[in-house]
């Protein structure tokens, strides 16, 4: 019996160590009582998840499904937008769109392109002309799915978020992502970070998606 307890304890420690090694999370407050938590898990593959938490509720109140990263880790990351009233949040992942409704305590995952918010004139032009014309139409624009540079600092959601360049009626808050790895660590177990809008340019068409 004692031997079984010792073996069980060792296995539990190994499992805890593996979770510490293979998962990274970061959180950012989006309202006075709610926060978003971005988690990346490395296993046989790589997955990311978004969780909604409440200040007065233990644990999460809603979570998305785990989203598989097809070309790990470069295609990881989530862009965060808010409505003008700040009562609903749209999250771009490139795989699908997540809609966060704090008042209902839920996260909806959608592959319905009709639910994508209306694009600005610039957003429409980019979508119609295609990727080959991006730099000509929108010089210096960036993609959603890429590493966060180590010299780009994390931060809180801006107090006065800027209007989105690409989506009408939305404000761009910032981006979750994996930080470019230290060569001694590699991509597995790399730091994850939320970069607010004032520290990095809004990704182009970050709410467009390609569901598998």
Image: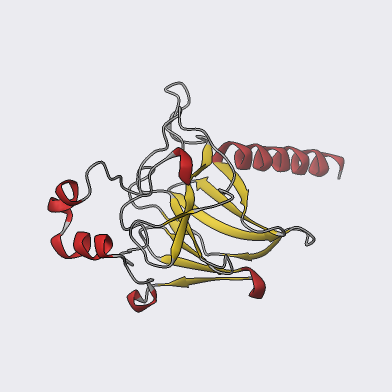
Residue 198, image x, y percentages: 47, 42
Residue 93, image x, y percentages: 41, 57
Q: Residue at x 82, y 43 (%)?
A: 5
Q: Nearer the viewer, residue 35 or 40?
A: 35
**Which image quarter: residue 26?**
top right
Q: Nearer the viewer, residue 47 or 75?
A: 75
Q: Residue at x 72, y 38 (%)?
A: 13
Q: Residue at x 60, y 39 (%)?
A: 18
Look at the image and tell me whether residue 177 can be seen: no
Image-based side of 193 in relation to 104, left or right: left
Using the image, determine if residue 63 lies above or below residue 38: below
Look at the image and tell me whether residue 7 can be seen: yes
Outermost top residue: 184
Image-based side of 192 in relation to 17, left or right: left
Residue 56, image x, y percentages: 80, 60
How has the structure been colored for display?
secondary structure
Image-based side of 32 in relation to 130, left or right: right
Residue 98, image x, y percentages: 47, 66
**Which image quarter: residue 61?**
bottom right
**Which image quarter: residue 205?**
bottom left
Which quarter of the image is occupied by the N terminus? top right
Which quarter of the image is occupied by the C terminus? bottom left
Total numbered circles: 0
Using the image, determine if residue 6 lies above or below residue 101: above
Q: Residue at x 54, y 37 (%)?
A: 154
């Amino acid at each position: 019996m004692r031997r079984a307890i010792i073996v069980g304890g060792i296995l539990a420690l190994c499992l805890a160590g593996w979770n510490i090694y293979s998962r990274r999370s970061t959180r950012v407050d989006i309202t006075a009582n709610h926060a978003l938590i971005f988690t990346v898990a490395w296993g046989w593959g790589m997955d990311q998840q978004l969780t909604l938490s409440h200040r007065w509720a233990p644990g999460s109140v809603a979570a998305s499904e785990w989203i598989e990263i097809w070309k790990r880790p470069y295609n990881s990351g989530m862009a965060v937008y808010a409505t003008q009233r700040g009562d609903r949040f749209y999250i771009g992942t490139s795989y699908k769109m997540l809609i966060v409704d704090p008042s209902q305590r839920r996260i909806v995952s959608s592959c319905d392109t009709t639910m994508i918010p209306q694009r600005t004139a610039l957003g429409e032009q980019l979508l119609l002309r295609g990727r080959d014309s991006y730099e000509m139409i929108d010089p210096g624009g960036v993609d959603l799915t890429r590493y966060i540079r180590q010299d780009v600092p994390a931060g809180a959601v801006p107090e006065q978020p800027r209007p989105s360049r690409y989506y009408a009626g939305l404000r761009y808050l910032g981006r979750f992502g994996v930080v470019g790895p230290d060569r001694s660590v590699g991509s597995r177990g790399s730091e994850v970070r939320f970069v607010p809008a004032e520290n990095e340019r809004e990704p182009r068409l970050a709410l467009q998606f390609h569901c598998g």
